[in-house]
Amino acid sequence: MQLIMTLLVRNAEGLLRENLEFHLHQGVDFFIITDNGSNDRTADVIDEYVRRGLARRIWEPQDDYSQGRWVTRMARAAAIDHGADWVINNDDDEFWSAGERTLREELALVDPDCEGLVVERYNHPPVAGQDGKDFLAAMVYRESRSLNVFGDPLPPKVCHRGYADIQVVQGNHGASRLGRPLVCRAATNMAISHFPVRDFASFERKIIQGGEAYARNRELHPGVGYSWRWLYKLWCEKGLGDWYDGQLLRPEHIEERLAHGTLVLDDSVLRTLCALGARKAA
């Protein structure tokens, strides 16, 4: 089985290597990575894996966050150029796993008539006082049920079989072929650990870059990417710092939420990376 992962990244040097090593351990064979205008060391990290024969880098200079179009391009290349049996369309802050099995082992068990899997995401909130520290060593608590910025359930992601005519929607939340949604089922043994909000500096930079890119996009409906647009508006109004402070886990929050079951201890990503030598132990 050929398992291909796509990634759309921008200024991702702080987490990209860990993401790639984690998913190699999960059985991913090859990565197709679109670098959307990075000006840090992201390209250097990608090129390390290109030289190892594990990745292909696509440079995308357009700055309007046409994610659906760019991910569709990668997903089709995965099928056409690399013979993918399964394709996972990922972000650098998402870590996919399958419990006691690897992703490869889990996907090999999927019924042939299933075209894709719907996989739930669970946020790891930022922890107060982690500035200047290894955030993965601090962010070892996972929400039992995650919500978006408006209090609605966090939308899941979809992985799919390799199809030359696949169409991936903005956000990687769905996919279709010739306008027909894929026949998907819920992936009961798979989950995504999500680290979207880490230190404030990187979060602020992400919101500014994404918000400005969405504002330049003339193809997408204004409702697409609304959470990102809302956070960018909040930044323009000088309110993003206060919102970020409200997301921080403090000792009293951790104790209370663990007791109520809305938060669980989950250091599986950190432990895996430490075992692989891809991250220093705390």
Image (spheres, rainbow, N blue to C red):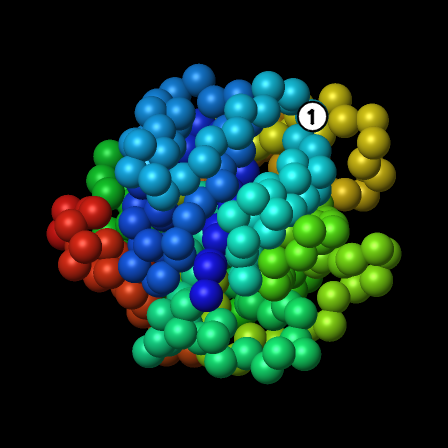
* Residue 176 drawn above or below residue 280: below
Looking at the image, residue 234 lies above or below residue 255: above
Residue linked to disc 1? 64
Q: Is 57 situated left or right of 114 in this image?
A: left
Kindly indicate the quadrant of the structure image that contains residue 24: bottom left
Where residue 104 appears, as percent x and y from the top left, is 41, 68
Q: Would you say 226 lies left or right of 196 here? A: right
Residue 198 place in picture, x, y as percent: 40, 42
**Is 9 left, or right, of 181 in this rendering?**
left
Instruction: Give the quarter of the image for residue 86.
Output: bottom right
Identify the residue at horizontal 73%, vertical 72% (top origin). 183
Dot 1: element? loop
Establish if 138 lies above or below 158. above
Point 71% across, 30% down: residue: 214
**Residue 34 in sight here:** yes
Residue placed most toward the observer, 55 or 272: 55
Residue 268: horizontal and vertical position, in percent? 29, 65
Amino acid on which the number 1 mark rests in the picture:
Asp
> Total number of numbered labels?
1
The residue depicted at 56 percent of the width and 67 percent of the height is 119
Q: Residue at x 35, y 62 (%)?
A: 26
Q: Where residue 162 sits in the image (x, y, percent)? A: 61, 58
Label 1 environment density (alpha carbons within 10 Å; few <14, some 14–19, many ≥20):
some
**Residue 13 can be seen in this image:** no
